[in-house]
Image (spheres, grey):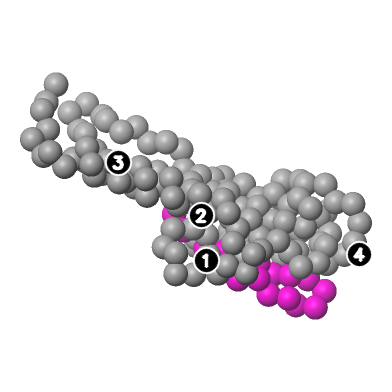
Amino acid sequence: MSMDRNPLRNLERQFEQLRQQFEEMVNRWDGEQFDVPQSGIATGGIGVDLADRGDKFILTADVPGFESEDIDLRLSDETLHITAEHEQAEREEGDERYIKSERTRRMHRSIRLPEPVDEDAVEAKYENGVLTITLPKTEPGELDGETIEIRTEESE
């Protein structure tokens, strides 16, 4: 067992843990529904654009550094939930010990849609870290949540 000679190392770990908890809290709370913009808060969250194209919505989300298998999309009660999560990496391998590890992460974003959409016609495509979701509009009705398949260039 090695002794760490840096007296501030434990404090640095606590600040890092606090930062991660703060990011998770901000990402879970969708301030936009309360007219609280999320810009200006550096959380490393998912940035989105939502465009109204008349008969459909097009949502574009930045999810860099993930594979399509790492992303979970769900539509429930006119709210789109995007979750991207890396598997927990092994922190120590043999004699190697990570000093800092920020690449293992989880991102989540919920976006309330202004109008109901047809769940069965929703399409999602992921290319170069950008997730594009086409959400055709529909008449108001009872909608249940369902997983949305994400296509890549190879699956087309």
Of the numbered discs 1 and 4, the one sitting upstream in the chain is 1
Is residue 83 visible in the rendered structure shown here?
yes
Of the numbered discs 4 and 2, the one sitting upstream in the chain is 2
Left or right of 63, for residue 20 = left
| Magenta span main SS | strand
Query: Badge 4: how crowded within 10 Å, few (<14), some, or many (20+)?
Result: few
User: How many angstroms separate mark 1 from mark 4 (CA)?
Assistant: 30 Å
Of the numbered discs 3 and 1, the one sitting upstream in the chain is 3
Q: Is residue 110 above or below residue 134?
A: above
| Three-letter residue code for mark 2 | Val
What residue is pinned by disc 4? 139
Q: Is residue 90 above or below residue 112?
A: above
What residue is pinned by disc 2? 26
Pair 4/2: label in front: 2
What residue is pinned by disc 1? 38
Q: Which residues are magenta?
A: 48-66
Numbered mark located on residue 14 in the image = 3
